[in-house]
Each structure stands twice: as structure tokens, then as C-alpha cells.
Amino acid sequence: MPLTKLRILTDGLTGAERRFSLRTLVILSSLPLFGVVAAFGLAPDTNTLDITPQTVTEAIALPTLAAASVDETYEREGELQPGDTLAQALARLKVDDLEIQRLLAAPNMRPIAKGLRAGQRVHATTTPDGDLLAVSFERRDAPTLTLQRQGEDFVAAESDATLESRVVMKSGRILTSLYGATDSAGIPGKIADQIAQAFSTRIDFREDLRRDDTFSVVYTVSYRNGEPVGAGKMLAAEFVNAGRTHRVVLYQDPLGREDYYTPEGESLKKGFLRSPLEFSRVTSSFTNSRKHPVYGFHRAHTGVDLGAPTGTRVKATADAVVSFAGRRGGYGNLVVLRHHNGYETYYAHLSAFASGIRPGRAIAQGEVIAFVGSTGASTGPHLHYEVRIAGKPQNPMAIKLPGSPPLAASQLAQFRSQTANWSEKLALLRGTNLAALD
Ligand SMILES: [Zn+2]
């Protein structure tokens, strides 16, 4: 589904971000309605001195600003948790207690409250003091229900709003960690995960990240009634790591399968992962990784040692078949995977194996095979990782690992027409970004 019309100013999924977007809107509204504009600013609620997020936004047509009146309203949204009462969910959205009581006492509230289920989204609009102006309930197989304040009462109305997908473009600079930078640029966590995932065959985010690395990302956000309700997916991204530029674009092949490729049509998914260690918001630690020694590859030592806490998940770096899983001398608990073209990978000193890991089992790239430990000849928790080609140990950090073949020539034309738009957007962000960094 190509999105031709960009109508994005900014997104924001939290109250703080929403306030920020309102401010951004004010700035943008004095600028031309058409064309590309960039807004730079510090997001509120960031107390880190060393973060300068650049929020780059594009406005091709301004969205309707009905909600963005000069009187500030606070938009907050949450999901009903299992066992939640409506009152608890609203309290989490910072709705004033008395306001919650007033809403729950409204005559039409009882059936609504009864019909709510875990996982449903509740959206509250309040004044800065927490007075409730409106509350919306997303319902399965039914239009969103909104209760709007009218005097002392709440009047219910069903909205026929459908979900609408918009495109957001942002860029940022790494100062402490990937997630620190995406957070301060207001990029949803789900999209940050997709960035880490898409580049995982090119960049080891645990070890390779450098201060002043930059990135740009183009992604979709779902809107309902002009309000963001959730992050969609990453369409394109660029990551400049230690001066090297990596780019990905999303491509849907004729069979409907979606995958990330370089703008030249080379698949990113099937190269070897740069790191066998799980990287996520929880495990990411740009600064902490400094505390764990990382020993390099040398002749006497057949692999690299990657410091990580016991229990950190270990992933297969490429599609493989398990050829060994058990105890072997100084390796301690060891998994050996056999890949195509005579490649093998070794994962040693493990504390435990993932369930079902035994010789002969087929493993997909990224699948969790084991957990970091300190078994065998090891003085502290770390992963010993080896890559062997035709039985000979190689330096995993230096060898060129095989990727899967690029797209067939017959698909390239379609690939280019489908992804050119996003490549252009990346180039555009690059221009604005560089200007900002100068
Ligand atoms: Zn080692």
C-alpha cells in the first residue's frame, strides 16, 4: 500500500510528546503549508544534558488542527491491562480521581464499563489540571465510543473514524545509547526495535555504536480521529555508524512477503547477525558494555569473548542445523551450528540451552539457542563465539560473511519503483540533518 500523500507534522504517543507536538504545530503553522520544513528542538522532560534530538518533520499538507486549540489539552492513551478496572486505567492516564467518579456515575457508563476487555485502548483528553473533557474507548468490531463532557454530564457518541496511516520521518544522534536517542527523538519503542532488528546483520549495537553516530527513519503511525494510536512499521532507515552509512528500505515482493533490503536490492535479513547476543531495550547498554571486558581474536584464542550477564539470550547468527549441543572440555556448555558453504559457529560457556536444542534440529537466524553463562574454562559470565570456515577458526569481526543473493533482475524494476520514494525521503532527511549538525 504505497502512501503517496504525506500529512505528517509530528507524532506523539504520550502526554509529554503531545504537548511537544502542539508546540511544534504552532511553529510550523507560520511556515508555508506546502513543502518541507524541519523543526528542531529539545523535547520536554529530557533531563540529560548531552542529548540534542533533531526532530525532522515534513508537512506536505497540514492536518486539520481541530484538537490543537490554543488552550492546552492533554491527550493520553493507555491499554486496559488484565484485571484492570476502568477507574484504574483512567487513573494511569492521570485523570483526576473526582473526575473518574463523576464519569463512572454517568447513567450510560455501566454497560460500557462492563463491555471493556484487556488490550482495549482508552484515550483521555483532559485539561492541564486533570479535568476530563472526553474519553474514548476503542472497541472490537464496533466504532470507537467517545464520551464528551457537556456541562456536568458526559454525552456518548460513536465515531465512524477509521484508522488512517500516516508517514513520520525523524532523525537523531547517538549520545548514550540507541534507545536513549530514539526516546529523545520521540520515536516509538516498536520502531526503535525495528531499527535494531533491520540493521542487525550490519551493526552490532552492543559493541559498534559510537557517540555521534546518526540515524534517520521513515515509519508509519496509525491515527484515529487525528490522534496517534500506535506505531506501524519502519519503511526506510539510514544509520551512520563510525562514519559508515547503512541504509534499508522495506520491500514487499509479488507474493506479499515483506523484508528489508539495501536501496540497491540486496537482502539484509539473510547475512549473519553481527552479534549472537540479544539486543533490546533491556539488554542494550552502550555504557555498561564498557564494564565488561571484550577480548579480541588472536591466534591462540579461536574466537571472540563477548561480556554479558548470565542468562542473556544467545541467538543463532544465521540459519543452521544444530551439530552439537552439550558439554565439551574448556568450552563448557557448547552449541555448534552448521551453516551453508562450510560455515560453522560455536557458542561456548553457556549456562543453559534453549529447549529443543539438539543435534539435527533446524534453527532460523535470530532464534534463541542458549543463555550466557560461565561454564568450562571461564572466569566470569561471557559468551565465547567462534566462526569456522571449513573447520578453520576465523575472526568473526573481520571476515566477510556471506549474505543471500540480491533480488532477481526481474524483480528489480518493481523494487526500485516501490522503494524509490523512501530512498528519496532518506536523502532529504540527510540534507536537513547535516545542516542541523553543522
Ligand atoms: Zn573465548
Image (spheres, rainbow, N blue to C red):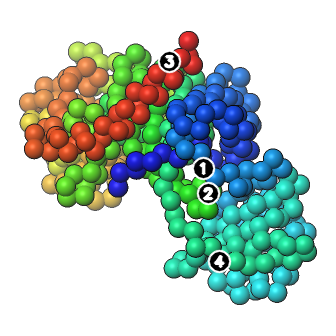
Question: Is label 3 or label 2 in front?
Answer: 2
Report the residue marked by disc 2. 226
Which numbered tag is attached to residue 158?
4
Question: Is label 2 or label 1 in front?
Answer: 1
User: For this view, does 25 lie left or right of residue 407?
Assistant: right
Do tag 2 and tag 1 residues touch (Cβ < 8 Å)? Answer: yes
Question: Is label 1 or label 3 in front?
Answer: 1
Q: Nearer the viewer, residue 302 or 153?
A: 153
Q: Earlier in the sequence, mark 4 or mark 2?
A: 4
Report the residue marked by disc 1. 63
The N terminus lies in quadrant: bottom left
Answer yes or no: disc 3 within 8 Å of ligand 1. Answer: no
Q: Earlier in the sequence, mark 3 or mark 4?
A: 4
Question: Disc 3 to disc 2, how far (Cα)?
Answer: 31 Å
Report the residue marked by disc 3. 434
Q: Position of residue 170 (x, y in %)?
A: 52, 35
| Label 3 CA crowd tier, 10 Å (few <14, some 14–19, many 20+) | few
Question: Disc 2 to disc 1, how far (Cα)?
Answer: 8 Å
Q: Earlier in the sequence, mark 2 or mark 1?
A: 1
Q: Position of residue 243 (x, y in %)?
A: 40, 16
User: For this view, does 348 lie left or right of residue 27?
Assistant: left
At mark 4, the secondary structure is: strand
User: For this view, does 406 lie left or right of residue 173?
Assistant: left
The residue located at (63%, 56%) in the rendering is 227
The residue located at (77%, 67%) in the rendering is 134
